[in-house]
Structures are given as C-alpha cells and as structure tokens.
Amino acid sequence: MSGRGRFFSWARFAGVLVKEFIQMRRDRVTFAMMIGIPVVQLLLFGYAIDTDPHHLPTLVEMTEESPILHALTTAMDTSEYFDFIGISTSEAESDLALRDGRATVILTVPPGFDRDMIRGLRPEILLTVDASDPVAAGGAIGAINGVVNTAIAQSLTGPLAFAAGAPAPFDMVIHRAFNPEGKTSTNIVPGLLAVILSMTMVMITAVAIVRETERGTMESLIATPVTPAEVMLGKIIPYVFVGYVQTLVFLIAARVLFDVPFEGSFLAFFLGFNLYIVVNLAIGFLVSTMARSQMQAMQLSFFTILPTILLSGFMFPFAAMPGWAQALGTAIPATHFLRVVRKVMLKDGGLREVAPDMLAIAVILVVVVVVALRRYRQTLD
Amino acid sequence: METGSDHADDIAISVRGLTKIFGTRKVVDGFDMEVKKGAIYGFLGPNGSGKTTTIRMMCGLLTPDAGAGHCLGLDIVKQSREIKKRVGYMTQKFSLYEDLTIAENLDFVARMFDMPNRKQQVLDAVRDLGLEGRAHQLAGTLSGGWKQRLALAACMIHAPDLLLLDEPTAGVDPKARRDFWDEIRRLSAKGVTVLVSTHYMDEAVQCDHIAYIAYGKKLIDGAASEIPSQIGLHTFVVTGPDLTPLEDRLKQDAAAGQVIRFGSELHVSGTDKAALEALAQREIAHGTHVWRAKKAGLEEAFIYLMAGARDNFGTEIGAEIGAEPEGAS
C-alpha cells in the first residue's frame, strides 16, 4: 500500500522535516542563536545572578579611634556582606559618597563612643543603607545584628568583660536612605526606563535599516547623490523622537501610577537620557550591519536585551554579581544609565553625581560608533 | 561639464579593462565598451554573467578593481558623485517604497536629487504617467507593469542624461513591456543615452547596439542585425513530420553543429558552411523533411555563444549560498 491518499504519509512528513533541518543549518545566524542562547545565558546568568549581595562598599564616619569599633568593623568585614572602603570625617562627605554610589553603607559612630559605652550610656551607632535597591540592602540589614553580637562578644574581654551582656551595650539605628519604605517599585520603575529605551531603540533602528537593504530600496538610494551621513542621520533622528515620547510617558506613569519621586536635577536627567538614546541607536546601527534580514535583526537585538535586563543591575543587584559579571555589566550602557536615573530620581543627584556614569556611556558610545562605521564601510563595496 | 578632453563629444560611456573581483571570483573581467550619446545599448548574457556588476560600476555603486573610464565625460572612479547626479538607475528589483504613495515616492526621489522646483516636477511626472487620479495610492498596490513605469518615472525625475536599466521588464506582461519600450525609444529620441540589460530577444533587436556578455567578458558586440554574420553562423530551417527523432539524430551529428527546436521547426546552425550544406543535401535526398536556408537570427547566435561559454557558476556555487544572492548577476 503506497502512502498516496493516506492522511499521514511518513515520506511526506520526512520530506518536510529534512528540508527544515537543511534550512536551519544554512541560516547561520539563527543556528548560532539556537546553540548560543542557551549556552551563553546559562553560563552567564546562572553564575552571575545572586539576589543576596555581598561586599557592599562601606564607609565608616568617625572622628576618633576606637578599639571596640575596630573589632566591629573587622567582624563586618569578615562577614563578607561589607567591604570597608575608607573613613569619612564629615557628614557631607559620607552623604556625597552615598549619593554618587561610591558607598552603599555608611556606619556613623558618634564622638566618645567607647567612653559612653563603658559608662553604660548605650550610645547609638547609625547604619545608613542605600535602600534605593531594597533587594541589595536587604541582605546587609538582615546580617548586621548577628555580626554586631559576634563582634561585641569577641572584643569585650578583659577589663571590658563586664559590659558584655546579652543585649549589646549600644544601639544600632538603621536608616534606609532614599527609600524608607523599602518599596520595590521605587527601585524597579526608574530602572525600567533604561530597559524600555534599550529594547525599543536598538530593535527599531536595526530593523528600519535592514528593511531598506532587504527590500532592495537601499541600492536605489545609494545610487542617488545622497551621502551615507545624510541617510543615517535621516533614518535615526525620527527614532530619537520616539525615545522622547517614551521617556515622557515613563515620567508621567512613574509619578502618577507608581508614586516614584523625582528628587534631583532635571538637567542631569535630560542629558543622561539623550546620551542613552544615542548610544542605543548606535547599537541598533551596529546590529543592522550584522543582520541580513529583518528577522535576524530582531533576533540579534533580542540578544542584546537580555544582558541589559539581567546584568545591568536592573533585575538583580549589581553588587551581588561576581567580578567577571560586573566587568561585563560595566560594558552595557544600561548599567550606567540605570545609575543616572536612580541617582537623579531617588537620591537627589545632580550633574556632579552622574558625571562618572555619563562618561562611561560616552566611552561605550565612541567604541560602538567606531566599530559600526568600520563595518558599514565594508558592506558598501 | 565635459572634463575628459580626449573623449569625443558624442560618446556617453567609454570604459577600458574594467574588472571587479568578489572574493576569488572575477565577476567582470577586462570589460571594454563605448556607447554613443542618445543610443540604446543592450546588455545580453546568461544570469551571473556580470551585467549587474558592470552597470553598478558605471554609476559609482561599486569601485572597479582595475580599469578606468568615463561616463558622461566624468571619471567613473574619481567623480562617482557627479555621475550619480546625472544618471538614472533602475534596479532589477522594484526599489521604490511600497508603503509610500506614488506621489510620496516621486517626491522622495526628487528630494534626493535636490530638485529646485520639486512639487511641480512631481505633479508633471504623475501626469505624464497618466496617474493623476491615483497619486495617493500606495505604490505596493500597483500592478507589475505600473510599478515598472513608476520606477522609470522616478529615475527620470531629475532629467538624467544616462539611464541604466537592469532587466527592467522581467516579469512584466507583453503589452506593458511594449509600452515600456515605446517610452525608452521616446527618451532616446530626446537624446537620453540608455544602457539596458535584458534576456528578451524582441527587446535586444530594439537596441541600436548590443553586447553579449558571459563569465564577465564581452564575447561580441555590434548592431543587432550584424551579430549573426559576425559570428559567421549559417542556419537551415527544417520542417516536416516527426521532428523529435530527427532532432535526436542530428544532435549526434557533428556536421549539424547546433540544433534548436522552435515549435514546429528545427533550426540547424553551424559555422562550417560547407559541412552544413553537405548535411542538408543528404537529408533533402532522404525526402522526409523540408530544408530551407535562412539568415541566422539573434536567438541562434546567442544560444551558440552561450554553449561556447564555460559554465559561469561552476564549482563555486557552494560559496554563493548565504552570500549576497544577487550580487554577482
């Protein structure tokens, strides 16, 4: 009995199957993505993502030496939640470090701490944690009590042994800076701007440029006296406006729907998002030089979006990632823009605080533009 | 405007030794050509013979790897930007924006050429096309024939001196093709030089001058009527019953040279006139078929040339997969 007329022919089915495998193998980009995505994502994100951050940069604000305090900071250091980065001598200095992101934790010790403690006056230590990312701050706050008790038990020996009671002979006051209620949306919503802009800008630009080549209109276009600069600027500027509209929608939604504050300098924010839009358009342009079809442009854009979400500190605390993952994250513009937005919106940041992040984005922009232009020249001839 | 002092005023294109290499493949190999102003110059040749690449070099889209030449008196390597302003190039594939209207497409092209009185030019072009009522129709909804005419109007909007048409009528019905060629001849009469590539013999004979290209080389060129005699091809037309067995038999016969079936006729051609005539005498004596000598036509000539040319895809076809699919045609 032949397969003809049957509802299901194995020969026909095998024909389709074999054809599909041949086409899959020939489409190199798709094939690379099929193998590459799971491997890269698993290795990258499996190891990189840790929601319990360690090694938070910590600054001690104090005016005099204190042996007990020394024991405390040593204990905090060995807990691996805190990394002491230095000593601050004034509130203004600590405040700036917290706002520009150099420090995540400030340990403020009042003058005469040892003396007051020995006298049983229960002095207060202030632990100020940057809670703009409540996930990153949570682990440290949870760990602090255990750390303190251990430190006290170890250091209150000899003549001080009398003070080593069950409750610690001082009070620890925890202050969640920038986000006193520890709301997740306060942290996530500003970060979303970085992700949304990146997602749409890269993809729209890449697809718009590839479409011109794919449909054959690029050939006619470059046969006219139009210059490459005219084509690229003309094609890209409309999407800058799309980015403006998205940012405006975002700002309104953040305020009205999520009640996210806008504390800092609008100028810093304005310069930041313009720079960020430009760097994303440049990445879209770079992607377009690698893709042959709109479909491939979509796939490649998608490939850039996942690290933006996972490695930038948007979804998971940047401080919790291992060093190599932080290095990768540093190469992603969203990592820096995220800091700009959070600093400005939540931490009352101005140009001075966001300057290092802006510089980082500018460096990435230069690299991307140089690579993209080199590739663009190659594809013309 | 004329800068090439050594070029006569009536020459639109003059190139020598034009060569283009893609990877390891010489797509165009030492190409020479001279085109008179106002002439219609036809490019013929199999797919992948280098016609498109040659046309792209004429208008500055590709830089030749070797060779030099002038186009409208301008150097094709150094003055490609100037050339672009005076050339209209119509690509193989419909290359206007399907999601723009007819008027919007024309307006866009007019802007690309910095036309001073753009609005009027667009209105005129729409009127000349006879599409006044449909100016706001999307180009993507036009039929194949109308798309070709719109594309031609778009590359004529800046009144170029030279038109480069790359297989402009592929996939267009015969009536639309005829209309298209009427338009080409009108433009030529106005002094526009036209360089056109085609696969159709009826279009080839409309050209003032044709060049046959294969594997990147020009095999022959001349007026359409001269080409068969240039090759020295002689043809007999054979009619009668049961042509298929005769065709099979003649194809084994060295004296028959080239045997082509044209419906109810066989065209037997060869360059050895004596051998061909002897064969005809023997067959006529046989008495079953009618053998009649005829002047060899273009079609016989081109099939003869194509058979002599080496296969220009050859072993490198594997390298073409995934590479620029139309780049080498």
Image (cartoon, coloured by chain):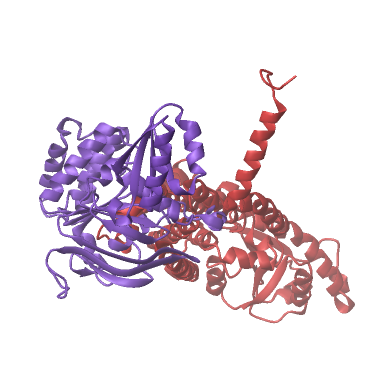
Residue at (61% x, 65% y) in the render = A328
Q: Which chain is purple?
A: B
- The image quadrant of residue A175 is bottom right
Q: Is residue A12 left or right of residue A244?
A: right
Q: Position of residue A360 (x, y in %)?
A: 50, 69
User: Vertical placement of B60 versus B291: above or below?
Assistant: below
Residue B118 in view of the camera: no
Q: Quadrant of residue A47?
A: bottom right
Q: Report the residue at 46% width, 56% height from top.
A: A288
Q: Residue furthest front?
A: B285
Q: Quadrant where the N terminus of chain A lies?
A: top right
Q: Is residue A186 left or right of residue B267?
A: right
According to the colouring, which chain is red?
A
Q: In which quadrant will I find the C terminus of chain A?
A: bottom left
Residue nearest the observer in this picture, A189 or A295: A295
Image location (x, y in percent) of residue A81: 73, 65
Q: Position of residue A77 (x, y in %)?
A: 75, 71
Q: Does residue A1 appear in the picture of this structure?
A: yes
Closer-to-camera residue (B266/A88): B266
Of residues B4 and A45, which is closer to you in this image?
Answer: B4
- Left or right, B7 with reference to A174: left
Q: Position of residue B36 (x, y in %)?
A: 17, 60
Residue, x 44% and y 68% (percent of image)?
Answer: A374
Report the front residue among B167 and A250: B167
